Image: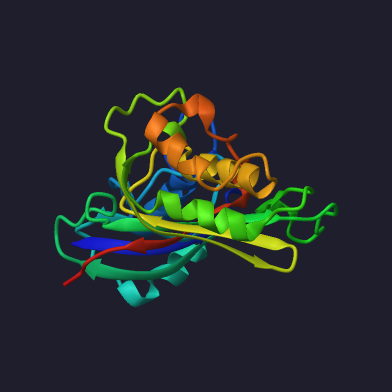
């Protein structure tokens, strides 16, 4: 049978989700916990790669097993074998052959910016502090240029080898609540560092370095060199994953 598991994790202590040699990853830790439950290793499919230090409030992974499981109790069993910075939120059986990544219809990310000269000692692992005053109305206007189907190679890390850079952004929004500024974006897929480069670009708009309309020029140029800096990873959260189970 195929099981779909929803987890959340604090990425501070991990080199992303995907397994890598000689470094600790969410995949590796979860695989060890699952091995204790199943008694055998199984191929785990994650819904997305996440960079080192990036967090997930909503992340899905799927695996197959012939072992009969008490699925409603599986989250409790896994959590008993996981560190506190990784939590299994729910588990359910899905159709055979379901793949957490390939059956995903899209994902939503949220990036947190603390627009202040002073850090918050309780949440400093979960935002990028930008002391310069940010015009969030201009940032939100700029973010609307992301919406639609575009070639986003201007917002892809230079070292990436991906050649098909066309993605569809469903929505993009910048909001402020006190000192906290959030950028939320939903899309059918993302390029390497795409959201973090979007954020760096929007921050330049917010600082008054660029006007919102310049984002359209950046997209059209298809040139990473003219986009903004890559925002640091700790402010980024995967917040939703979209599936069609019907």
**Residue drawn at 59 percent across, 41 percent down:** 200
Is 142 rendered above or below residue 150?
Answer: below
Quadrant where the image shows the N terminus: bottom left
Q: Is residue 109 above or below residue 222?
A: below
Viewer-nearest residue: 105 or 166: 166
36 or 34: which is nearer to us?
34
Camera-nearest residue between 30 and 198: 198
Residue 40 in the figure: left or right of residue 140 = left
Residue 13 occupies which quadrant of the picture?
A: top right
Nearest the viewer among 78 and 152 is 152
Q: Relative to 139, say whether 200 is above or below.
A: above
How many numbered discs sit on the rendered protein? Answer: 0
Q: Can residue 204 be seen in this snapshot?
A: yes
Q: Give the position of the C terminus as an image quadrant.
A: bottom left
Q: Position of residue 72 (x, y in %)?
A: 35, 77
Query: Horizontal and vertical percent for residue 100?
Result: 28, 54
Which residue is painted at 42% across and 49% down in the image?
146
Residue at the image position 29 percent from the left and 70 percent from the top: 92
- Residue found 61% across the figure and 40% down from its top: 210
Q: Is residue 192 visible?
A: no
- Looking at the image, the residue that sits furthest to the right is 118
231 left or right of 103 in image: right
Residue 131: x %, y % from top left: 79, 49
Q: Residue furthest bottom?
A: 72
**What's the coloring here?**
rainbow
Question: Where residue 148 sits: x, y (%)?
Answer: 32, 52
């Amino acid at each position: 049978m195929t099981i779909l598991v929803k987890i959340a994790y604090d990425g501070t202590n991990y080199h992303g989700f995907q397994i890598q040699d000689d470094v600790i990853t969410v995949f590796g830790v979860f695989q060890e916990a699952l091995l204790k439950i199943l008694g055998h290793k199984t191929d785990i499919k994650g819904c997305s790669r996440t960079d080192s230090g990036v967090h997930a409030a909503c992340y899905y992974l799927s695996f197959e097993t012939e072992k009969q499981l008490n699925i409603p109790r599986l989250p409790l069993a896994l959590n008993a074998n996981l560190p506190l910075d990784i939590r299994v939120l729910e588990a359910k059986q899905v159709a055979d052959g379901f793949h957490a990544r390939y059956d995903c219809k899209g994902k939503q990310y949220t990036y947190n910016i603390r627009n202040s000269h002073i850090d918050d000692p309780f949440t400093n692992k979960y935002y990028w502090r930008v002391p310069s005053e940010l015009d969030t109305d201009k940032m939100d206007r700029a973010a609307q240029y992301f919406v639609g189907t575009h070639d986003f190679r201007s917002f892809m890390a230079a070292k990436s080898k991906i050649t098909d850079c066309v993605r569809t952004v469903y929505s993009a929004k910048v909001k402020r609540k006190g000192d906290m500024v959030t950028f939320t974006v939903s899309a059918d897929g993302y390029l390497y560092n795409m959201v973090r480069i979007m954020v760096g670009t929007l921050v330049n708009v917010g600082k008054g370095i660029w006007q919102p309309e310049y984002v359209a020029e950046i997209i059209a140029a298809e040139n990473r060199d003219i986009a903004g800096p890559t925002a640091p990873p700790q402010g980024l959260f995967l917040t939703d994953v979209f599936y069609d189970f019907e």
